[in-house]
Image: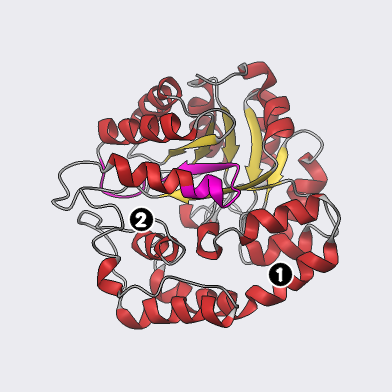
Amino acid sequence: MANYTKQNARQWVRENLKGAINCTIPSFTQDLKSLNPAAIRHDVRLAKEHGFIGTLGVSEISITLPEYIDFIRIMREEAGEGFCITHHASWNNLEQNIEAVKMAEEAGADFVLLSYPPNFYPESEDDIFEYTKAVCDATNLAVMVFPMFLWGFASRIHPSDIPVTVLRRLIDECPNVAAIKAEGGFPSIQSVIECHRLFGDEVVISMPIEGELLPLSQIMPLQLSATSDHEYYGPIIPKAMRLLSEGKYDEVTEIYWQLHPARKIKSALAAQLHGGAFINRQAWKFQGWLQGYNGGPLRMPTQRIHDSQMMSLKKGLIDAGLTPSMDPFREFFKGRIQE
């Protein structure tokens, strides 16, 4: 159980979530019938070694809710105290999301990233508000609201995906809305600037996209980068966050330019790997594998990643002066810790 109350969730986030939170995608046994606890523990340990302050337990793959809750428990046990286990509130409908967030809280999650189901079709700001408030009301955990293009709200509701009028209401009426993952209207940076200006004194504003995080943090305080596939860069983003907190902007700028070759390749592949309104979790798992994370097979249905894409991602890290795994690509599909 979280060591804070619903009423002081914002204070807890402000005081404790300073740094970067990466993503952990569940690992399975070779026959894909069960979770692979040893591999999951490996990924949590490595995230801690890399300097992350926490990790998101990704739910947007083929996994049952009971398995997912076991996944959260395994991560919690391995993480110990002081490492933020984030629940991914991304399930099929509101009822299941309410069930899931209650179970995740009981299993030891500290924090919630709130997503919206593909079948959720809001036609007004009120629809978004009511859905979000219902999830927030169902848990004592701190919640991070997530304006984002994937939800498809921009064409009907507002170009910023979740307008600030809705965010204002949520902050006023839900004491556990403690952070905003400000990707609204991406690739525009207006959302993070607007959220920081309007709400930065009340809730923590997170910028999860390192290409925007590293420059923007030099002119506006951003204490949190959560949640993202920062594991692609190994320990570099946690290091950059520490340097930003120390005001060492010249060193952060050097990191920004160092990563630029990898950033360009990763961005160029985004349309291929994340085409349509979804994230290619197979690709994210491969990105982590390049830095020593488990990798391993995912259940159908899953997106694919091909040799040319894997080679490009690997080359990006080499061009950035990093040292990705040189193991044959076939090893990614087996996983480092096999059961």
How far is the residue under mark 1 from the one under mark 2? Answer: 26 Å
Q: Nearer the viewer, residue 69 or 324?
A: 324
Q: Which mark is residue 294?
A: 2
* 273 sits left or right of 330 in the view: right
Q: Nearer the viewer, residue 319 or 170?
A: 319
Q: Which residue is mark 1?
A: 255
Is 51 included in the stretch rendered in magenta?
Answer: yes
Disc 1 secondary structure class:
helix
Q: Which mark is residue 96?
A: none
Q: Nearer the viewer, residue 195 or 10?
A: 10
Q: Could one spot residue 322 in this view of the protein?
A: yes
Q: Could one spot residue 189 in this view of the protein?
A: no
Residues in magenta?
46-63
Q: Are marks 1 and 2 in contact (CB under 8 Å)?
A: no
* Relative image position of residue 294 (x, y in whole percent): 35, 55
* 138 sits left or right of 307 in the view: right
